[in-house]
Image: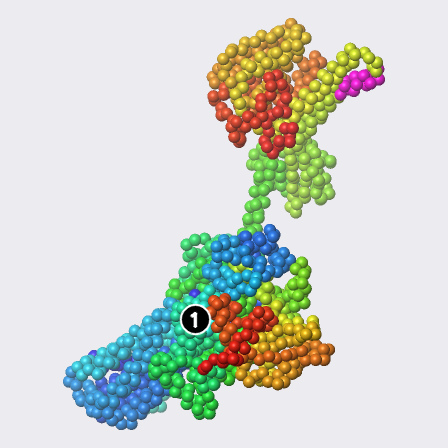
Amino acid sequence: MSTTADLIAEGRLDEVWSKHCGFLDLDLNQFMQIQRRLLDEQLELLNRCELGRHFFNGRKPKTLEEFREIAPLTLYNDYLDLLKPDKAEILPLPPLLWMRTSGRTGEYGPKWVPCTRAFYDQIARYLIGTLILASAQNKGEINLRPGDVFLYTVAPPPYLSGTTIRAVSEIFPFRFVPSIPEAEAMDFQERIQQGFLRSLETGIDFFVGLASVLLRIGEAFAGGGGGGMKPSAQLLRPRPLYRLGRALVRSRLQKRFLLPQDIWKVKGMVASGMDVQVYKQRIEAMWGIKPLEAYACTEFGTMALQAWGAGSKGLTMAAESALWEFIPEAEYRAWRRDPTYKPKTLLLDEVTPGRYVLAGTSFGGGPFIRYIVGDLISVIALDDPEFGIRLPQIVMESRVDDIIDMSSLVLLTERAIWQAIGTLNLPTMDWIARKEYDHNGEPFLHFYIEGRDVVRDGLADAIHQSLIDTMEDYATFAAIMKRNPIRVSALSVGTLQRYLELKQAEKADLGHLKPPRIQPSDAITERLLRISAELAQHPPKH
Amino acid sequence: MTFVQAICLLALLSYLGLLLLVGRKARRPESRAFLLFLLAITAWQWGVTIVTFTRDPQVALFWYKIALGLGGSFGFFYALFVRQFLNLRGHAWVVWLGALLTAFFALWTLAGGEFIITDIYWSPRAQFWLPELGWMTYPMGLTLYGYLTYGMVHLARHYRRTHLPLMRNRLRYLLSGIGLVFAGSIVNYNETLKAYPLDIIANVINAVFIAYAIFRYKLLDIGLVVKRGLFYFIPASILAIGYYLTVLTAVNLFHAVTGSQVALISLGVAALVAIALQPLYVRLQSWLDPLFFREKYDANRMLARLSQLAATVLDLYRLTAILLQEITATMHVEHAVIYLRHKESGDFGPVAQMGLPRPVTMSFRPDSPVLTWLQRQRGRILTRTEIEVLPEFKALWTQEREELESLAAEVFVPLFARGELIGLLVLGPKRSTLPYSEEEHQTLLTMANQTAIAVQNAWLYQMAVREKERTELIIDQAFSGILVLDLNLVIHKANAGATALIGRPIADLVGKPFTEVFGLEMWDEDSPLYRAVQNGRAVEPVESVLVTADRRRDILLGVTPLEDGYLLNFADITRIKELDRLKSGIVATVSHELRTPLASIKGYTDLLLQEFEGDNRTLRHEFLNIINEETDRLVQLVTDLLDLSRLESGRLERKREPVYLDELVREMTRMLAVQAQQAEVTWVLDVPEDLPPVLGDRTLLLAVIKNLLGNAVKFSLPGGKVEVKIRHQDGTILLEVSDQGIGIPAEELPHVFTKFYRASTARQAGIRGTGLGLALVKEVVELYQGHIEVTSEVGSGSCFRITLPVAGDVHQGVDGGAPGIEDRKPHPPSGSMDAHQWVFEPSHSDDAA
């Protein structure tokens, strides 16, 4: 079998595109044929294993229709006693390795997810596809080359992102900075620091990380901070010196501060996080390239990707990652209220534009059956003629339970709030938002905002107006309520970082280092306010 | 010509040849870069070759400058080619710097060459002019070798990374060739060695290597261009030479001297040559065709053979075997498999294979992406790479991928017949490890189009043959008789059932008129055959009588008119009819045996209720005794029926326990003592004390003794004797019961053990009975591997003998069960005849109750 590196070396670039990005060329029939066939295979495996018997209650579904009739919708709670490394024999196929992800405070500890051979191959193949798309400006353009420098700031194995990096390293000769064994031995901050320091020597071809990290580094340069890189002997070597000198000249010629794009010419950038949409343009201004959006989760790997050049408005679903079922939001909420209710689900060829909760069934011997990922997504269009994509386009809205319900008139998601804030052109900031009640029992939406020179008079009104402008439901809500339900409080600069450090010191799980942005608990909010007050009294010395 | 000159000329011609080939199809960037490299190295070789031929120092100096100025850039162009060939991006400065330096050195050298070639001198050893090199040749050489090294390093690195055999071969030749050039040219810096043409020899080898890589490993896809060029060049050259020689001969012959004379002769010769050499030209082409287009030539011949084959062969296995043989041999394919669609399931399964060590088991489901793709992309061949990269093949199951992997298929050729995908030809890799070319794809598609219908016809034919064989087998093996008559009612075909029923061999039946075999009775107006012939419609089976030479049989005969005759289907129902008769008799006997005691019971019960309401206790007691006896008879009748039924059905568990027959006989004579006394019969027992036991069910064996002894008493005449004798002999126990009773007619003896059979003497004497007792006795004796026989004479009495194996000669326990099972149920108490205590199999435990 020809590897991707072989195909590139032989100039068979069309085949490389087809292999990694061909999913964008599928039509709905082809997409559904893949879904149906792979489900047939999965049903054969499930019908033979204890896990399948457990969820099918002794019955043996043979077709997609029977499966949807027989199998229940599941949550991670349903797998608590089943997904354990010492109980691998009950799974459809023995796992290659186990991955973990953060659990749910108060409900269960870390989630353990078995990773089959097929899953391992799939995550690697899609990451290469993601990088190709991130570095292409046109359809079919392949800018990936063996030996490309790959910088990543993601969690190490056994988390999905680290596992994916390791899987990719086995099928494509990237040059990872720092090398994978080194990186896995470092903590998160050190890895970022070392990665950027070494990439002064090597350059960066591809970068994968959180949007906020990309932005923060860019801003550190723009602020004249040199990207937060501490002086080091490594900087005194010829290549870093040359690279920095050249970047300095470039920035001076353009009469501005040094930016990452002056130092590195990045071919492709992949960013994750709900804030990508908002920070996209700023990241592009600093790095000279638009980050591509990727939607993935530990249970199913890559779920959807943006088209080439990070230009498409929506993301396209991956056909072979799982059987995708879309639960209309109202149906989902009815089920949450009454677990005996059987919500209607739609397949991809049945969806219409609207908001859905996504449920997936693993393929290739994975364990999840009609598993609710927990994300609220929107189908924004049934195709994308601009990019020639014939499949529905989705965007991620928020975690399905991370929603602020204002008088049952409007459901505010994290994405909706980011969109509203994004229109205000505020300096870089971070926030959390909670529904609280005043002494009259009136609910209000309380924003706690951290950022230099962000909180000012009239900010609450500006956010209110922006929400009216960007959300139809909110506009209706505002018209009915005839009041601004938004209040804004400032958090001292560094509050969220301090919170993170304290949680790190407490050895908290990686998924719980940062406070939830939507509806954090009273305890978390109080702790943040305490930290903020301390920082106000004793600001850190820089 | 010196050796050096010859080598130089050879190298120059090699490069010119390569230049010509590559230059004709240099469309892709890597081909263009390679052309530049060849131009530079040819310029170098051109200059050096001229230098070796010239004696003029000025000419030598000029051509050295040309060689160095233009040829010195080959290192840079080589690096450029490597970058394009390996798709290397980035480090654009390498290219710019190389272009700058190369241009500078070329211009500097051509413009004057100061500090590059300072002077030239005649080398007596080399026998040509050699240059004095200036200091600038060092930076110039550094550039040249630097870029050569750059190219070689990248090639080597890629060689290490790739595992594709084709790519590795290409790289191997490229690397070896340029490595030699590198080493050969560097010797020019050595004063002693530069007099030897080592660099030129290296150049020749490099040219050969490159040419080999182009032809053998498709380094640049110009193979076809080269072949076509040579194909037309050779016959054209031969013709031109022929033409030239003819003109020369004609000019000499006619002593032509002026231009117009020569022109006139040339025209005439041209016309003659065109006419005379035309057949030669055609012949030449037919010789050259297999020489230059061997593969194409072979493929065409294969297609012609297969086309002929398709029209003549109907045997699927032969057709597919030849097909696979032709393809694997002509296209040098390692292995091949033919798949055909199964009519019912729609699956595509393997029907023939070649070159694989094990039989292929993989089949394609109707929804397989492979089939879906081939159906959609009508007229296209699917390749392994497409399966690897096209998104729709993500629908393949892991198992299917593994199976495809083990099939090691390179291409999947669809077989379409009448617009329908009916099969697949799956080909493995070529022995050369080269990929299949476009031309080969076309050949395979043509072959598929030509043979698909033939394959389908053969497949359908085979199915029809199989179906026919199956039908014939069914007919032959049928128990019922089947005859096929022609329209003249002559037997055309007969099955084994018919011959068995008629009692004549097939040869004795076929060709005979129906009436000759069956007699005219079967052809009367009511006969089924007559009706079918008259009405032309099928006649439902009706009962008839078949009279053959030695017997008469009841048959059920149906007739179905066929297109060209009649089908007679008949079954022997003689036994059924006999059984029917027997059943009627049994029903009558059982009814009688049931009705008689019931009538008696009913009568005495009525009397008790109506007539004797008073207190006549004696009479009532007598009536009740009668009712009790009649009830016992009924119970005995039903018990016997049930026991016999169980014995016959095999549902009875064969219990084995040691049983002493002498004990049973003594017990039974005690039980029958009253009955014997009433019948005035005397017992004569000859029963030894120390007899060994037999193995059996005590209750069943007691029933045997009871029946034998009871019958002896019942059928004895008053004053008679009943003798019971037991012996141990030859590992068996012999029990003999003889009486001096009414006896059984000799002709009835074979039937006395038949159910419900009653001897005529018993019936005539009015002795009541069911005809079940002896049937039960026989079943039990045979159940325990024993034997029973009877001798009798009417009026003198009968003698029944049974033999049973002694306990040591048979296994103890329960057939199919654990020994000792009898412990669960105790033996019935002595004298008890409760047959319901027999042990039955667990699943039938309800019956035992």
Can residue B381 be seen at all in this image of the molecule?
A: no
- What residue is rendered at 47% in x and 22% in y? B809
Quarter holding the N terminus of chain B is bottom left
Q: Position of residue A412 (x, y in %)?
A: 64, 74
Element marked by disc 1? loop
Name the residue nearer the viewer: B107 or B682.
Answer: B682
Q: Residue at x 56, y 57 (%)?
A: A43
Q: Residue at x 65, y 23 (%)?
A: B640
Quadrant including the C terminus of chain B: top right
Q: Is residue B841 left or right of residue B410?
A: right
Q: Position of residue B61 (x, y in %)?
A: 23, 91
Q: Main secondary structure of the magenta part?
A: helix
Residue type marked 1: Asp
Residue neighbourhood size for the residue with mark 1, other residues' Cα within 10 Å, grouped as few (<14), some (14–19), many (≥20): few
Q: Please name the colour scheme applied to the rendered image.
A: rainbow
Q: Name the residue carrying label 1.
A: A187
Provide the residue span drawn in magenta: B598-611
Identify the residue at horizontal 71%, vertical 40% (top origin): B540
